[in-house]
Amino acid sequence: MLMKKVEGIIIRTTDYGETNKVVTIFTKEFGKLGVMARGAKKPKSRLSSASQLFMYGVFVIQTSSG
């Protein structure tokens, strides 16, 4: 597992299950990325505000080697 820092903008969010979101981030380095924001739909989650549509920022993502 590798941790990467990417700068980008959120262009799509989709609810996944009761507490998760699938977020599509458009980045300069990697293009369009689909990532899972676990627990982003919980009321007290810190990810709920950071996973809103058109949010621009630096995101830390975890990727697999395969």
Image: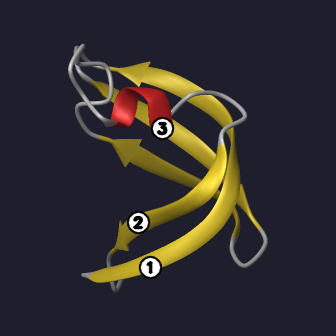
Residue 48 occupies quadrant = top left
CB atoms at circles 2 and 1 under 8 Å apart? Answer: yes
| Marker disc for residue 52 | none
**Residue drawn at the location 24% of the way across and 28% of the way down:** 45
Q: Residues within 10 Å of mark 3 (few under 14, many from 20)?
A: some
Mark earlier in primary sequence (3, 1): 1
Callout 1 secondary element: strand
Q: Is residue 6 left or right of residue 29?
A: left
Q: Residues within 10 Å of mark 2 (few under 14, many from 20)?
A: some
Task: Judge whether 50 appears above or below 17 on screen.
Answer: below
Mark earlier in primary sequence (2, 1): 1
Q: Position of residue 66 (x, y in %)?
A: 36, 82
Kindly identify which residue carries mark 3. Answer: 50
Three-letter amino acid code of the residue under disc 3: Ala
Kindly identify which residue carries mark 1. Answer: 4
Three-letter amino acid code of the residue under disc 2: Ile
**Residue drawn at the location 35% of the way across and 41% of the way down:** 37
Callout 3 secondary element: helix
Foreground residue among 40 and 64: 40
Q: Position of residue 12 (x, y in %)?
A: 66, 32
Tell me how far mark 3 sits from mark 1, CA to CA. 17 Å
Foreground residue among 35 and 54: 54
Task: Judge whether 17 appears above or below 25 on screen.
Answer: above
Q: Position of residue 50 (x, y in %)?
A: 48, 38
Q: Is residue 64 left or right of residue 31?
A: left
User: For the N terminus, which image quadrant?
Assistant: bottom left
Q: Is residue 47 left or right of residue 39?
A: right
Tell me how far mark 2 sits from mark 1, CA to CA. 5 Å
Foreground residue among 18 and 50: 50
Three-letter amino acid code of the residue under disc 1: Lys
Kindly identify which residue carries mark 2. Answer: 61
